[in-house]
């Protein structure tokens, strides 16, 4: 699956919008990404999982660990492609923890998967959860890398597509300067 194939899938499901958007932060952007909209289609989720699974197969992964909620669907699909189990970590009293009942064994080779990597913070936190359980994190993966290469993860990282969506304060937004009407993502124009 090429980067273009992945982006085409995103556009088709409305997960990637292009135009002129006012984000909830107040910033403006020419693009808007909502990964859940592509993952709502199980066949597409399975294709993305297969592609990410192929990219990480070399790491001889024994279990996939994802942060809830965003990472769960794609984690499941990558695990399906690799023929290993998929577990997740969730936030309890503010701290990311393995979901009750899940465990990792000492030295187990773990792949950490989430849907979109932005700063890398949530993947890093999930890596720490696995390491605290004694597992060996062999790699991390995401469908989309939005970090612009600045995530600084210290394990090998694989993404199907790199996407940098620039944001602008309204007063210096080039789309505003060109008189393009601004909309909230998801609203009809
Ligand atoms: Zn604007």
Image: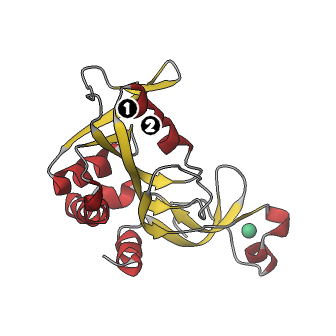
Give the x, y percent position of residue 135.
34, 33
How far, Cα to Cα, is label 1 from label 2?
Answer: 7 Å
**Precedes in sequence: disc 1 or disc 2:** 1
- Image point (53%, 23%), residue name: 94
In the image, residue 82 sits, relative to residue 176, either above or below, namely above
Mark 1 lies on residue: 89
The secondary structure type at the circle numbered 1 is: strand
Q: Quadrant of residue 21?
A: bottom right
Give the x, y percent position of residue 91.
45, 27
- Image point (41%, 51%), residue name: 140
Give the x, y percent position of residue 115.
41, 53
Discs 1, 2 touching: Cβ within 8 Å: yes
Mark 2 lies on residue: 126
- Image point (39%, 69%), residue name: 10
The secondary structure type at the circle numbered 2 is: helix
- Image point (31%, 52%), residue name: 74
Inspect this view and state whether residue 113 appears: no
Q: Is residue 150 left or right of residue 117?
A: right
Which corner quadrant holds the N terminus? bottom left
Q: How many marks?
A: 2
Which corner quadrant holds the C terminus? bottom right
Residue found at the far left of this picture: 83
User: Which of the two residues, 101 or 46, is positioned nearer the viewer here?
Assistant: 101
Q: Is the CB–ligand 1 distance for label 1 below 8 Å? A: no
Give the x, y percent position of residue 14.
41, 67
In the image, residue 64 sits, relative to residue 177, either above or below, namely above
Quadrant observed for ligand 1 in the rendered image: bottom right
User: Which of the two residues, 100 or 20, is positioned nearer the viewer here?
Assistant: 100
User: Which of the two residues, 50 or 21, is positioned nearer the viewer here?
Assistant: 50
């Amino acid at each position: 699956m090429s980067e273009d194939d992945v982006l085409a899938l995103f556009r088709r499901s409305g997960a990637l919008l292009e135009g002129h958007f006012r984000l909830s932060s107040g910033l403006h952007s020419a693009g808007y990404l909502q990964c859940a909209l592509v993952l709502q289609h199980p066949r597409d989720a399975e294709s993305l999982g297969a592609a990410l699974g192929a990219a990480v197969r070399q790491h001889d992964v024994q279990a996939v660990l994802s942060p809830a909620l965003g990472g769960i669907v794609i984690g499941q699909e990558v695990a399906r492609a690799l023929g290993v189990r998929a577990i997740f970590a969730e936030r309890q009293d503010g701290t990311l923890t393995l979901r009750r009942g899940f465990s990792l064994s000492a030295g187990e080779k773990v792949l950490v998967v989430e849907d979109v990597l932005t700063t890398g913070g949530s993947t890093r936190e999930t890596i720490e959860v696995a390491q605290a359980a004694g597992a060996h994190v062999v790699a991390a993966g995401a469908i989309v890398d939005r970090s612009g290469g600045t995530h600084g993860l210290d394990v090998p990282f694989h993404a199907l597509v790199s996407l940098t969506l620039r944001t602008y304060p309204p007063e210096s937004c080039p789309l505003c300067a060109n008189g393009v009407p601004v909309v909230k993502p998801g609203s009809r124009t």
